[in-house]
Amino acid sequence: MLVFTLGVSEGTLFWVLSFFWNSVLVGYLRTGYFNEVLGRFGRVVHGDSVKFGLSMDRFVGSSLIGLYSKYADLGDASKVFDEITEKDVVVYTSMITGFAQCGDDRVYDAFDIASDMQKEPLDPNRVTLVSLLQAAAQLGMLKEGRSVHGYAIRRKIGLSDEVFETTLMDMYIKCGKLKTVACLFGKMNMRCIGCWNAVIAGHLQWDSPGKL
């Protein structure tokens, strides 16, 4: 009440609170204090966000999704996702990344979210595609991985990008497609350390060290 008597509009208050909570969450997430955030006041932040209508804000919402996902609480991450009224690429990618890194069969949900994203329509970016490739690699989903690769080629996403190329190669390695990996590796103008490591690890994984 005091804020309003000082002449601060409701819209300004919403922006200030949104900026504050988002800054707090991002700060803790970047320093790796996931347990501290969720254990001490993470759900309090979520509760306050709901009370002030901030859970509908995509900036606060995407940070909360990241927080719950890092803590492997995809149930609450999904609730936050559903609360956000105007979802953008960052929000969808945050949810996709959460499922992609969960390490169990819920990885499949990453592709369902990506499908919903494109129906909006919103176009996946490099970060989105990297997360989808990670999801495909976890469960050996070659068809889905190839689909992501094809999309990247058509949209010219990830060209000469170290993270994307390494993740792409890792996906094909996990799916046992070493010839495809060799082809990709051979076409690279600049071979980063990550790509070399991926190729070496792949050949060792499939017991073909003589082909290195």
Image (cartoon, rainbow, N blue to C red):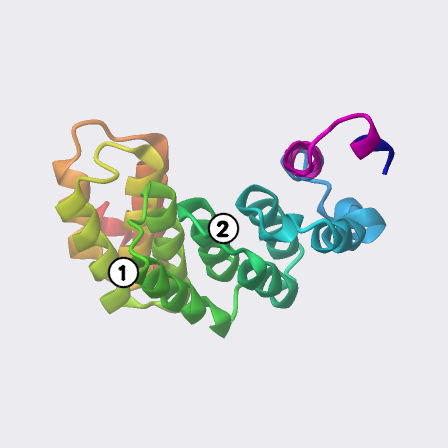
Q: Position of residue 24 (x, y in %)?
A: 71, 35
Q: Is residue 15 left or right of residue 201?
A: right
Q: Residue at x 68, y 38 (%)?
A: 10
Quadrant of the image containing the N terminus: top right
Residue at the spot of label 2: 94
Give the left or right position of residue 116, taking residue 37 as reference: left
Q: Is residue 68 above or below residue 193?
A: below
Q: Is residue 7 magenta?
A: yes
Circle 1 sits on which residue? 145
State which region is magenta. Answer: 4-23
Q: Nearer the viewer, mark 2 or mark 1?
A: 2
Helix, strand, or loop for circle 2?
helix
Which of 170 and 103 lies nearest the eye of the viewer? 103
Identity of the residue drawn at 37% across and 49% down: 128
Which residue is painted at 40% across and 60% down in the image?
A: 135
Q: Is residue 30 magenta?
A: no
Measured as percent of width and height from the top left, residue 169 is found at 28, 49
- Mark linked to residue 43: none
The C terminus lies in quadrant: top left
